[in-house]
């Protein structure tokens, strides 16, 4: 995937632990964003139906709980790693985890932008074998044999 993804993960065990923490934080943040928009959707289209409003409040409640758990994970991770005698547990602080999250996001967005920008070069439908702009006379004059 190129330069943007070269620093995502290496064979260093410390980098693998940091990558796992970053994936957990990223998954929770994506879920919280989804839960927020889901709750907004439910509030807008609920017509004050009690069951839908309750679902929306539950989505907000769970979002706040998971954000709290994420913050606790970020600040407790170095202490837990000290208990398990992981070398240099301070390298797993919130700062380093968010740097790794940013690297993952940067890698994914770079890959998506590369796929989108290279699409005209890799379009499977733009091939000499499958011409899309044939006129009526081109179809008649082609070498195709039809059994009618």
Image (cartoon, grey):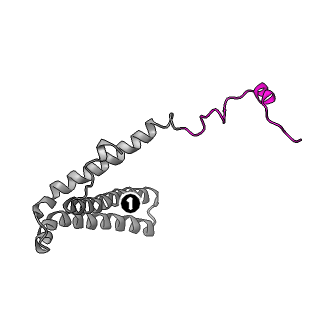
Residue at horizontal 28%, vertical 47%? Answer: 6
Q: Which residue is mark 1?
A: 39
Direction front: furthest residue: 11
Quarter of the picture holding the N terminus: top left
Q: Quadrant of residue 68?
A: bottom left
- Chain part drawn in magenta: 123-148
Residue 139 sits inside the magenta stretch: yes
* Location of residue 32 in the rendering, given as x and y in whole percent from the top left corner: 32, 60
Residue at horizontal 43%, vertical 60%? Answer: 42
* Location of residue 21 in the rendering, given as x and y in whole percent from the top left corner: 24, 62
Given residues 126 and 52, the one toward you in this image is 126
Residue at horizontal 38%, vertical 44%? Answer: 111
Quarter of the picture holding the C terminus: top right
* Location of residue 85 in the rendering, given as x and y in whole percent from the top left corner: 11, 72
Vertical arrangement, residue 96 with respect to residue 87, above or below: above
Direction top: furthest residue: 137
Direction bottom: furthest residue: 83
Q: Is most of the magenta stretch helix, strand or loop?
A: loop
Residue 106 sits inside the magenta stretch: no
Given residues 138 and 47, the one toward you in this image is 138
């Amino acid at each position: 995937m190129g330069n943007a993804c070269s620093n995502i993960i290496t064979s260093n065990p410390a980098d693998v632990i940091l990558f796992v923490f970053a994936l957990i934080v990223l998954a929770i943040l994506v879920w919280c964003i989804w839960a927020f928009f889901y709750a907004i959707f439910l509030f807008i289209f609920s017509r004050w139906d009690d069951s839908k409003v309750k679902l929306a409040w539950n989505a907000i409640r769970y979002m706040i709980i998971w954000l709290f758990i994420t913050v606790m994970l970020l600040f407790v991770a170095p202490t837990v790693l000290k208990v398990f005698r992981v070398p240099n547990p301070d390298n797993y602080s919130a700062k380093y985890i968010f740097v790794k999250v940013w690297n993952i996001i940067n890698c994914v967005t770079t890959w998506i932008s590369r796929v989108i920008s290279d699409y005209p070069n890799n379009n499977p439908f733009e091939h000499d074998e499958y011409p899309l702009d044939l006129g009526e006379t081109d179809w008649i004059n082609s070498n195709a044999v039809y059994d009618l």
